[in-house]
Amino acid sequence: MKHVLTVAGSDSCGGAGIQADLKTFSALGTYGMSVITAVTAQNTTGVVMVREMDPEMVAAQINCIFEDIKVHAVKVGMVSSAEIITTIGNCLARHRAVNIVIDPVMVSKSRCNLLRPEACETLVKVLFPLATVVTPNIPEAEVIVGGTITTLEDMKGAAVEIYNKGAKNVIVKGGHMEGPAIDVLYDGKQFLQFSGERVATTNTHGTGCTFSSAIAAYLARGLTMTEAIEGAKKYIHRAIAHSFPIGRGVGPTNHFHELYEKAGLLD
């Protein structure tokens, strides 16, 4: 079994962050491990409070994993400060981490800033050159490139700009645009598009975390980048289609939909 590490924030309602990542790793047949960068108090209606880990604790978590266990892929999610970002970058470089998926989590669905604005430059400078793939959604890509994205061509242009910042591959996710959910991958040579039918639901809490974690799990298992994205796209689509209508806000996806289906628990 392959081992996958997530470096991200904790979500107290279990739909995103560390909790979503670990569920995804397990659902896709890998062993999940975690480094917590922050603890959030949140539910389906929004984020109430964020408490960061200190950089020393983040480093200690990363180092003790790599010094004992083979890590086949790393997913990096919520990293709110420049100090923590620099710490993560130094640790991953020191341990020569492979299959690094960077999900530039900046703002929650309830519009809470999860990445300090002044830390965005550090994220790009430190972590993007280490990334096997960067997975921004449209609002995140707009912040990174400093422009507006409203068309498929805009997505392609943003992917090129982000690639030029050091990432080996960039996939700009099109879920925030109207129509079919089209994601654009750029690998420095060509564009590939991944299209999926949009699911009519408001239960999309943690979709970005889940998608990037699925890519990491598939890369750890030896799939190519294209195969990993195709698999992640199918996985998140079914997770959204069988999502949970819990709480009073944006409900979570169903990471274990295949197990629920086999148990006869899906509608």
Image (spheres, rainbow, N blue to C red):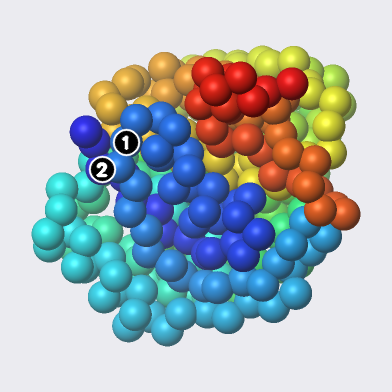
At 46% from the left and 70% from the top, the residue drawn is 37
Quadrant in which the N terminus appears: top left
Residue 137 in view, yes or no: no
Q: Position of residue 125 (x, y in %)?
A: 44, 60
156 or 22, which is in the foreground? Answer: 22
Q: Where is residue 18 in the image (x, y as percent from the top left)?
A: 49, 56
Residue 201 sits above or below residue 134 on the image: above
Q: Quadrant of residue 25?
A: top left
Residue 191 sits above or below residue 171 on the image: above
| Residue indicated by mark 1 | 30
At 48% from the left and 43% from the top, the residue drawn is 23
Between the C-alphas of marks 1 and 2, the distance is 6 Å
At 37% from the left and 58% from the top, the residue drawn is 34
Dot 2: element = strand
- At label 2, which amino acid type do we have? His
- Dot 2: within a 10 Å radius of its alpha carbon, few (fewer than 14), some, or many (20 or more) residues? some
Whether tag 1 and tag 2 are in contact, CB under 8 A, the answer is yes
Q: Quadrant of residue 72?
A: top left
Q: Give the mark nearer the N terminus: 1 vs 2.
A: 2
Quadrant in which the C terminus appears: top right
Residue 20 sits above or below residue 43 on the image: above
- Dot 1: within a 10 Å radius of its alpha carbon, few (fewer than 14), some, or many (20 or more) residues? many
**Does 188 sit left or right of 108 as displayed?**
left
**Does 141 sit left or right of 176 as displayed?**
left
**Does 113 sit left or right of 2 as displayed?**
right
Dot 1: element = loop
Q: Position of residue 263 (x, y in %)?
A: 55, 22
Q: Residue 6 carries which label?
A: none
Q: Where is residue 188 in the image (x, y as percent from the top left)?
A: 44, 27
- At label 1, which amino acid type do we have? Thr
| Residue indicated by mark 2 | 3
